[in-house]
Image: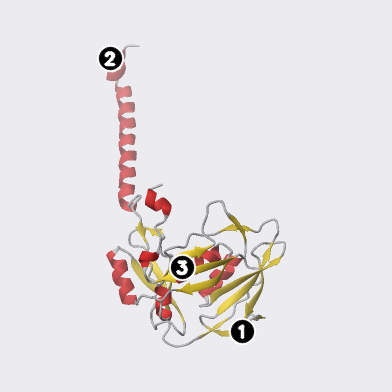
Amino acid sequence: MNIKKFFTDRITLNVLGGILLVAVLVAGAYFLLGAITKHNQEIIVPDLTNMSTEEAEALLGSRKMRMDIVDSVYVKRMGRGLIYRQNPKAGSKVKENRCIHLTINAKNSKKVTMPNLIGYSMRQAKAELLSRGLVLGSLIYREDIATNNVLSQMYGGTEIDPGTSVESGTAIDLVVGLNPSDNITWIPYVLGLKYLNAMDAVHDNSLNVTNVRFDNTVTDYSDSLNAVVYRQEPEAVADSAFTMGTGVSLWLTLDTNKVPVRQDENTGE
């Protein structure tokens, strides 16, 4: 083949030009898309628990995020108008300009209707409770064919019927199934997490918080919401399995210097 003739042929030049144009367009689109979506540029969502909405708005604004108050609950011992929960959770990675949905503590007591959670999965039931302004209490496991399937709902040690009027912020215990062949879970690492976030992490792993101890830096309920976990038992150990429903003990403080540095973060491994 005559190489010189090949590269001077009009048809060949058109084909090569087309290939080059497509390559340039694809590369340009890739870099443009990355710029628009801020590829790999994620922001860590801060913990807004127990903040005023003004404090939260200022903090989120400094990190190029927005907020929206979507619901309220009533917690007797918590400051009025302070943030009770948030979605996405603290520590989540989001894009710039993400809206953080907030649930605040109402100024006045309010009643909500108890939903029917029978047949829900534990996670679905927890989400439904939160959407109603209620709180997941304890997980009570009973042998059943379906693990984490809600068998009954309890309040104060007795079953509570759907449609019952209860005060917002009430803790509801769930009796859930436990299949002996599907009953294993792991202890989450909750050191450094605030009280409510640590409770969420424990429940999400089908475990119970059975013992909570605050040190002398915590003097009231508001302090307890701001306190962070500095010790947990059992510890979060890789590949160490536990039966669902196992109790976890938490020690909390306002002194963040008591929180140990996580080993893998300290060593960079």
Q: 202 and 234: which one is in front? A: 234
Q: Is residue 121 left or right of residue 189?
A: right
Question: Could you tell me which residue is drawn at 34 percent across and 77 percent down?
Answer: 52
Category of crowding for the residue at label 2, using alpha-carbon neighbours closer than 10 angstroms: few (below 14), some (14–19), many (at least 20): few
Q: Looking at the image, is 183 positioned above or below residue 162?
A: above
Task: Give the distance between the C-alpha atoms of the residues marked 2 and 3, in whole angstroms.
Answer: 70 Å
Label 1 is placed on what type of residue? Answer: Thr
Image disc number at residue 164: 1
User: Measured from the top left, where is residue 92 in percent x and y?
Assistant: 41, 60
Question: Could you tell me which residue is drawn at 51 percent across and 80 percent down?
Answer: 169
Please tell me which of labels 2 and 3 falls first in the chain.
2
Please tell me which of labels 2 and 1 falls first in the chain.
2
Question: Could you tell me which residue is drawn at 53 percent across and 77 percent down?
Answer: 134
Task: Give the distance between the C-alpha atoms of the residues marked 3 and 1, in whole angstroms.
Answer: 28 Å
User: Measured from the top left, where is residue 114 in percent x and y?
Assistant: 59, 80
Q: Based on the displayed image, in which of its 4 quarters is residue 79 positioned?
A: bottom left
Q: 207 and 250: which one is in front? A: 250
Q: Check disc 2 and report its element: helix, strand or loop.
A: helix
Front disc: 2 or 3: 3
User: Measured from the top left, where is residue 152 in percent x and y?
Assistant: 67, 74
Category of crowding for the residue at label 1, using alpha-carbon neighbours closer than 10 angstroms: few (below 14), some (14–19), many (at least 20): few
Q: Is residue 131 visible?
A: yes
Q: Is residue 76 left or right of residue 67?
A: right
Which residue is labeled 2 in the image?
4
Q: Based on the displayed image, in which of its 4 quarters is residue 215 positioned?
A: bottom left
Q: Looking at the image, is 9 positioned above or below residue 217?
A: above
Q: Check disc 1 and report its element: helix, strand or loop.
A: loop
The residue positioned farthest toward the top in the image shown:
1
Label 3 is placed on what type of residue? Answer: Asn
Q: Check disc 3 and report its element: helix, strand or loop.
A: helix
The residue positioned farthest toward the bottom in the image shown:
108
Label 2 is placed on what type of residue? Answer: Lys
